[in-house]
Amino acid sequence: MRYAIFFGSLLCLALQVHGAIKPCIPSRVKFANLQLRITQGAKARIQEKLDGLTKSKKHFQLLVHKFDLFAPIIERVLKKEGVPDDFKYLVLQESTLVADLVSSADAVGFWQFKKPAALEVGLNINPYVDERKHIVAATHAAAKYLKKNYAHFHNWLYALLAYYEGRGGARKYVDKRCTEASIMSVAPDAHFYIIHFLAHKLAFRDFIGKGRHPQLYLYEYKEGHGKSLREISQEFGVDKKQLMDYNKWLKYASVPKDTNYPTIIPLTHRQYAQHRHRVSIAPNFRAKPLDYTQYWETADAFPTIIEKQGTQTGTVVVLVNGIPGVKARKGDKLTGLAKAGQVTLAQFLAYNDITEKCRPVPGQVYYYQAKHSRAGVHFHIARKGETWWSVAQKYGIKKKILLRKNRLRKEVPLEPGRVLWLRFIRPAQVPVAYEYKVK
């Protein structure tokens, strides 16, 4: 069946004739898993936007080169997240790949997230980093947001519109007959956001991905944690200012030890050829038997708590393992703790891997932002009475990732003395270990 949608409009094939860009609008455009039929009235609106995008050949070519620089990262992340490749054009529409772009609505970064939405999809925004400005982190977040929209509407075009309008705002444009549709018509009164997206797709689709950036390659350096940008610039022989330009997610000229994402290194193609075979500097766990005993004392240093500020409720907001959080007191309620951190209850529950049925445990730390994907130390030896959840809270890492690092798909009883892996996934050939000196 064919369905009409009252906010769309599609773009046409962009052709290059005698050195000039001459785009035209086709009658049909494939988008994700949809065939979009473009009406004559919609074509005119798309053409107008497309002409604006291609008016300056010099500016257009700069954007093509810029996208080709970021494309390997963006396309890889979208594929990994299971989001249609077509959404790569959305980052051009949102920010033209300007990392620190701030909109009039206070949306920030490559994919233009407002702070509440960014926190909802797990981006860290704290005194040290703003991951909305990190191309890898922000692309993962955008993909997750789009997938949530798709799960709600079962239609990628509506998922796209909800990226701008929000799921609630997009509902007024939704024709329920279009759920699970494979063919849709884009009418003359299409929503401008859909018009603009299709213009970007049609303007750039025949030009991007045809080659690499003329000068640079973006190398994802995963061993920069705890290093200054000066040290990294010297290590790779790149200009420090240029390094800072590609790492605007950092609020200081150093990479936090507990960050989840790589430092982006702009390398010449010759430099990349020299560094491409570098491997992750992870401990060689097979070189000799592991000595876990030192980690009895290491555990006492966590969680690290730094007082940050008080609130009108009397609850003290602190930095827990570098993440804004709180230490619960007797009588605290989940709603009160969430309010003290200026997050919704749903966000508070998600950040702390808990449900509404849970009661705050006096003395237990709780977080106001997403936890990390790895801890600041390699191992933890389980104490009597500890659970997977309490260990995840202690080190500020997500419980599901803690289970994954210990090669578990679901939670099992945590036996005292079990050695838990906190930074890397336990290799299959390394057996589960126990230290029986249980406190």
Image: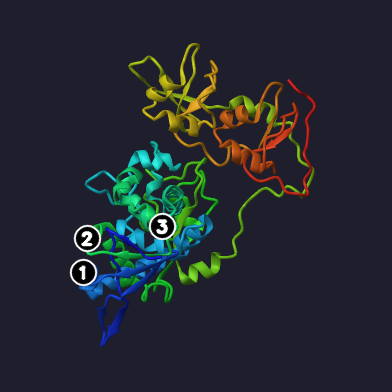
Q: Do labels 2 and 1 touch, CB within 8 Å?
A: yes
- From the image, tell me which residue sits under label 3: 156
Tell me residue 70's x, y (percent).
41, 63
Q: Do labels 3 and 2 touch, CB within 8 Å?
A: no
Residue type, numbered disc 1: Gly
Can you name the residue that lies furthest to the bottom here? 18
Evaluate whether residue 368 shows in this view: no
The colour scheme used here is rainbow
Residue 376 vs 383, above or below: the answer is: below
Residue 90 vs 387, above or below: the answer is: below
Which class describes the residues within 10 Å of circle 2: few (<14), some (14-19), or many (20+)?
some
- From the image, tell me which residue sits under label 1: 41
- From the image, tell me which residue sits under label 2: 189
User: Residue at point 42% right, 76% down?
Assistant: 210
Tell me residue 167's x, y (percent).
35, 45
Secondary element under disc 2, as helix, strand or loop, is: loop
Task: Please state which of the two labelled residues, at mark 3 or mark 1, is closer to the viewer.
Answer: 1
Residue type, numbered disc 3: Trp
User: Residue at point 46% right, 17% down?
Assistant: 333
Q: CA distance from mark 2 to mark 1?
A: 8 Å
Does residue 410 appear left or right of residue 233 in this picture?
right
User: Residue at point 45% right, 64% down?
Assistant: 33
Secondary element under disc 1, as helix, strand or loop, is: helix
Q: CA distance from mark 3 to mark 2?
A: 19 Å
Front-lying residue, 308 or 409: 409
Residue 313 vs 382, above or below: the answer is: above
> Residue 181 appears in which quarter of the rendering?
bottom left
Tell me residue 195's x, y (percent).
27, 63
Front-lying residue, 176 or 140: 176
Task: Please state which of the two labelled residues, at mark 3 or mark 2, is closer to the viewer.
Answer: 2
Counting residues from the N terminus, which is met first, the one under dot 3 or under dot 1?
1
